[in-house]
């Protein structure tokens, strides 16, 4: 950029945060003020005679490096709508306190489940509780299972201001330090949230199953519940494991856990994949809101129990709405990957003597289960790599696909949808409307009777869902930078890719992936890549690094002109003495969406 101060017009080059976008030439009188800021700039034109496009300044997000400004940046980059809700939206929300659930019994054939032992299990601090569960014995070899989902559509009417807003946002966005809601907080945390000891409205799926977990029947109904307990995963797991506890809630948890294991086993035998992702959890300082600790997200047996019940509900609802609306129902499809998409995975596994059969999801599932090496982390790593070989699941309109092409590959489910999280996903709101019409308790909105219209809804949801994921990852990256800004850490990592002058490593303890350079800057030819063996060897033969080897790295943060910061991983010769010792194996994270 040119020199200049306040009042002096300067022609300045702004450097976009996204490296794919060229520098933008802007005329400004505020160079001195803007130089250290994160700003939003719009491209106006790009002359064929100019190296750079011309643009104009729109607004300032904040000082570069400031946590709030960097968060504003990632929200803007990912087109996240985080504006306050309008008065028209708030006008759609009933006043608090809301306690009118009981008055709805009988309307829309709504049933009374307040006498059932119903409970919810969620992450700690969860206030937007979408789902609650119950299970009871009906007789010999017969159980009743209930999945009760927040009845959001009772309050979010088609075409209302709150519905239009939710249809635009499509999803709640989860950042490290906060949640950006799809719906106003009075709905998400109170009126719709299935909290303990309050009466709430639900859309419920009720099954009869036998003791082996086989479904005998299913019905769907609106309901009223009064949850007996809102537990964290840890609290529920502790109840299950404590043999001294025999109360109704604990007995229900154990019975449901047994059922979930049976169904999970059956799903695995059908070819459902247990994949993995490097999910990171931060411990945040309540005063400064800075990260105090960071580590991989741990998954307990009870997480998988809840997951299994949600899958059961989503699959049953998918069956029902497809049966009634074969041309314009909304489903979730996970495309079968072409075998060549797994070439990198097969090559990587073969380098350490592990064979991956990818001819079907069942064959892949068996290969993943058998992929065991002395390194306890290897199996999780190979599952992470397998996940990356696949395309993302997408919301689809059924009229665009033949029945065999609707399948969800990762779950080995012929059809699948999202019904269980309407507080935070608009897809589930749409599915609730399809289901209500399918059981004759509400008319299907006109907008859902047209294939092109439903396709448009799917496109918008897919776009927003992808952006929310990207924003979530960017937030994790930001807080990882903040965490390491004032500390240098030495830790073990695994090599996940080898190049001629570098390696890509994954750090299990922090869920970080990054490049470790082998050659010094400007140096060439010090290492050679052996593609067949998936290893890189120094020209003198003294050092070699192979795929999945454990290497020790130093993690630090370095300034990166013009004003950025980046995480730097540097290779160490070995483990620091105080760090030596065996590492605990990590839990596997199930990807079921």
Image: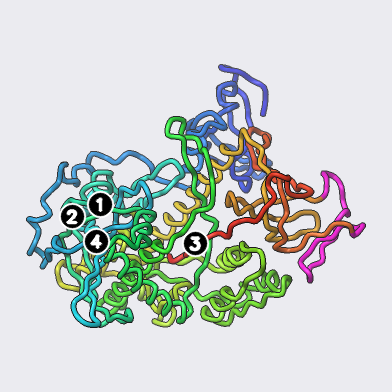
Identity of the residue drawn at 54% across and 41% down: 478
Identity of the residue drawn at 24% across and 61% down: 247
Which quadrant is the N terminus positioned in?
top right
Which image quadrant is residue 344 in?
A: bottom right
Measure the C-alpha gap from mark 4 to mark 3. 30 Å
Determine whether label 1 and label 2 are within 8 Å by CB: yes
Q: Earlier in the sequence, mark 1 or mark 2?
A: 1
Q: Position of residue 82 (x, y in %)?
A: 38, 42
Q: In this rendering, would 367 be left or right of 528?
A: left
Q: Earlier in the sequence, mark 4 or mark 1?
A: 1
Q: Which residue is mark 3?
A: 589
* Highlighted range, magenta: 519-541
Q: Position of residue 497 (x, y in %)?
A: 70, 61
Q: Secondary structure at mark 2?
A: strand
Q: Earlier in the sequence, mark 4 or mark 3?
A: 4
Q: Secondary structure at mark 4?
A: loop
Q: Which residue is mark 4?
A: 247
- Asked if residue 423 lies in the magenta stretch, the reply is no
Q: Secondary structure at mark 1?
A: loop
How many numbered circles does the render carry? 4
Which image quadrant is residue 567 in?
A: top right
Q: Which residue is mark 2?
A: 200
């Amino acid at each position: 950029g040119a020199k200049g101060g306040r009042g002096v017009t300067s022609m300045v080059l702004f450097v976009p945060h996204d490296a794919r976008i060229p520098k933008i030439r802007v005329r400004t009188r505020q160079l001195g003020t803007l130089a250290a800021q994160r700003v939003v700039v719009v491209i106006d034109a790009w002359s064929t005679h100019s190296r750079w496009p011309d643009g104009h300044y729109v607004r300032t997000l904040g000082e570069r490096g400031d946590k709030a400004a960097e968060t504003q940046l990632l929200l803007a980059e990912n087109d996240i709508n985080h504006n306050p809700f309008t008065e028209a939206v708030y006008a759609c929300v009933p006043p608090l306190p809301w306690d009118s659930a009981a008055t709805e019994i009988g309307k829309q054939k709504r049933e009374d489940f307040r006498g059932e032992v119903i409970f919810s299990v969620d992450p700690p601090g969860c206030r937007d509780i979408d789902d609650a569960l119950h299970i009871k014995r009906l007789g010999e070899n017969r159980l009743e299972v209930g999945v009760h989902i927040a009845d959001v559509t009772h309050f979010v009417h088609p075409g209302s201001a709150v519905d239009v807003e939710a249809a635009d946002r499509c999803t709640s966005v989860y950042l490290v330090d906060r949640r950006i809601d799809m719906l106003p907080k009075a709905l998400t945390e109170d009126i719709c949230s299935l909290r303990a000891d309050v009466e709430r409205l639900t859309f419920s799926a009720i099954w009869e199953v036998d003791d082996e977990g086989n479904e005998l029947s299913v019905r769907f109904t609106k309901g009223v519940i009064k949850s007996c307990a809102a537990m964290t995963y840890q609290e529920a797991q502790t109840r299950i494991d404590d043999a001294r506890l025999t109360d109704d809630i604990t007995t229900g948890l154990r019975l449901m856990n047994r059922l979930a294991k049976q169904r999970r086993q059956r799903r695995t035998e059908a070819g459902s994949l247990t994949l993995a992702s490097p999910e990171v959890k931060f411990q945040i300082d309540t005063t400064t809101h800075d990260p105090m600790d960071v580590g991989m997200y741990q998954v307990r047996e009870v997480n998988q129990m809840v997951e299994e019940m949600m899958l059961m509900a989503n699959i049953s609802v998918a069956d029902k709405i497809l049966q009634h609306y074969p041309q314009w129902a909304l489903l979730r499809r996970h495309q079968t990957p072409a075998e060549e998409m797994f070439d990198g995975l097969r090559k990587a596994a073969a380098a350490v003597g592990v064979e991956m059969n990818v001819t079907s999801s069942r064959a892949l599932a068996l290969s993943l289960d058998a992929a065991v090496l002395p390194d306890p982390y290897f199996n999780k790593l190979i599952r992470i790599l397998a996940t990356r070989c696949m395309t993302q699941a997408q919301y689809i309109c059924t009229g665009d696909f033949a029945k065999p092409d609707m399948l969800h590959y990762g779950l080995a489910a012929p059809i699948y949808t999202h019904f269980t999280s309407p507080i935070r996903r608009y897809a589930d709101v749409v599915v609730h409307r399809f289901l209500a019409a399918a059981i004759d308790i509400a008319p299907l909105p006109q907008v859902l009777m047209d294939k092109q219209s439903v396709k448009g809804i799917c496109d918008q949801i897919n776009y927003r869902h992808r952006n929310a994921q990207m924003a979530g990852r960017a937030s994790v990256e930001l807080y990882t930078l903040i965490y390491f800004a004032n500390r240098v850490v030495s830790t073990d990592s695994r090599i996940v890719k080898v190049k001629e002058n570098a390696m890509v490593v994954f750090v299990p303890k922090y869920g970080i992936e990054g490049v470790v350079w082998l050659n010094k800057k400007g140096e060439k030819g010090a290492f050679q890549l052996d593609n067949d063996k998936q290893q890189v060897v120094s020209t003198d033969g003294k050092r070699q690094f192979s795929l999945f080897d454990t290497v020790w790295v130093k993690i630090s943060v370095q300034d990166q002109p013009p004003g950025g910061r980046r995480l730097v991983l540097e290779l160490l010769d070995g483990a620091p003495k105080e760090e030596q010792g065996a590492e605990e194996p990590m839990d596997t994270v199930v990807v079921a969406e």
